Image (spheres, rainbow, N blue to C red):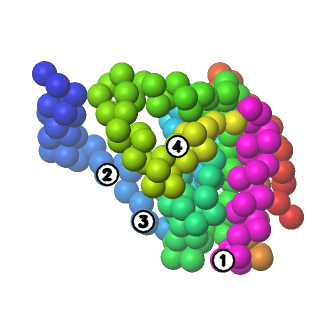
Amino acid sequence: MSKIDDILSYNEQFVSTKAYEQYATSKFPDKRMVILTCMDTRLTELLPKSMNLKNGDAKVIKTAGGIITQPFGSVMRSVLVAVYELQADEVFVVGHHNCGMTGLNPQEIIQHMTERGVPESTIETLKHSGVNLLRWLRGFDNVRDSVVNSVSIIRNHPLLPANILVHGLIIDPDTGELELVDKGE
């Protein structure tokens, strides 16, 4: 049985027993906050627990490394939607130690792409079309610097209201301990 079959089988039972009722909430974050963090599996339950959050308290945006690479990309758009349409009034950028984006080698990713069937010609076409894959796929060398950079991009964004607090934190993915890197004031 594939993963999708397992998921759909479980979901049928989840819905029929009304297990969803304990998660009922609105689309507006109860604590009026938006969190940008990493997609790391260790943070799925640990991050909300370490921040005393329950279902419905915050909008959570997950991306590789919890980083903003483009001020007008989809991550920043999500932050702005959370602020303007979903009543968030505080932003938290939460990086973590031992992140897979630390020291990520974009050349290796491209090699893995070609090994898994992406034609070299596609890579070359993208390069000649102005897509800098090496820049787009790069990670970071230091999680603290990465958090500070993402906080700066959000805080200085021309479309973000000046009264929105933007904070930077780093979480230990083993213990949940939070380290304050940048307190928005």
Badge 2: few (under 14), some or many (20 or more) residues near its Cα, within 10 Å?
A: few
The image shows residue 165 at horizontal and vertical percentages of 76, 65
Judge from the rendering whether residue 10 lies leftward or rightward of residue 142; answer left or right: left
Q: Which image quadrant for residue 142?
A: top right
Residue range (magenta): 141-161
| Predominant SS of the magenta segment | helix
Query: Which residue is tagged 3?
Result: 26
Query: Which residue is tagged 2?
Result: 21
Tell me what residue is drawn at x 61 percent, y 58 percent. Answer: 70
State the SS at label 2. helix
Distance Cα–Cα, label 3 vs label 1: 25 Å
Badge 3: few (under 14), some or many (20 or more) residues near its Cα, within 10 Å?
A: few
Please report contact status of discs 2 and 3: CB closer than 8 Å, yes or no: no
The image shows residue 30 at horizontal and vertical percentages of 55, 63
For the residues carrying marks 1 and 4, which lies nearer the camera in this image? 4
Dot 4 or dot 3, earlier in sequence: 3
The image shows residue 12 at horizontal and vertical percentages of 14, 40
Distance Cα–Cα, label 1 vs label 4: 28 Å
Residue 36 painted magenta: no
Give amino acid for label 2: Glu
